[in-house]
Amino acid sequence: MILKLISSEFNTRGWLSQSSKPSISSSASFILDGFPRTASQATSLDSLVPINFVVHLVTPPSIILSRIASRWVHEPSGRVYNTDFNAPKVPGKDDVTGEPLTQREDDSIETWRQRLHKFEETSKALLQHYQRKGCLWRVEGNSSDEITPKLFAEFERKFC
């Protein structure tokens, strides 16, 4: 389904070649976030378009779990707070409405431990796929403040 959407969008933009070998216009530039999720999806994507750069963001599980434990939500609006770095002005209350904040039921530490374990299991073959192709780049950091400059520097090095 996702591949059909991607293919359709590329065709709409006139980016896909009509030859039997996957290729995309040299003027095309795009980012796929969260897709593919499996090696088989990556192989299918390879048959549609050549992928030249894959970023593997690495943050220690302890940091991820800490952020989850500190996350509070104003459900009606979707506003998200974090008691460590984006705390509400009044603890437990939404800054705009003053209504109570809640923690999502699926944001438990145990749920997230299981999600991280599952992600590690399912992403292993995907990462190996792109490592074999020579287009995998790994960046580590504890926050976007650490990761973003590294990412921009690598983009600059690779594409400018």
Image (cartoon, rainbow, N blue to C red):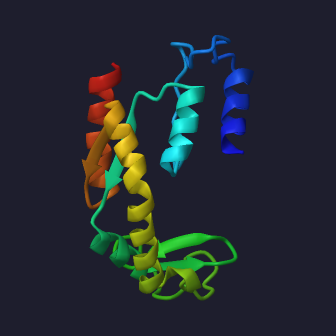
Q: Position of residue 142 (x, y in %)?
A: 27, 61
Q: Is residue 12 left or right of residue 26?
A: right
Q: Is residue 121 visible?
A: yes
Front residue of 109 and 75: 109
Q: Is residue 21 left or right of residue 77?
A: left
Q: Position of residue 106 (x, y in %)?
A: 55, 81
Q: Is residue 89 left or right of residue 84?
A: right
Q: Is residue 94 visible?
A: no
Q: Residue at x 63, y 18 (%)?
A: 15
User: Is residue 102 shown above or below 144?
Assistant: below
Q: Position of residue 112 (x, y in %)?
A: 44, 77
Q: Residue at x 31, y 70 (%)?
A: 61
The quadrant the C terminus occupies is top left
User: Is residue 52 shown above or below 91?
Assistant: above
Q: Residue at x 27, y 66 (%)?
A: 60
The quadrant the N terminus occupies is top right
User: Is residue 127 shown above or below 141?
Assistant: above
How many numbered markers are drawn?
0
Quarter-of-image position of residue 64: bottom left
Q: Residue at x 55, y 26 (%)?
A: 49
User: Is residue 13 shown above or below 124?
Assistant: above
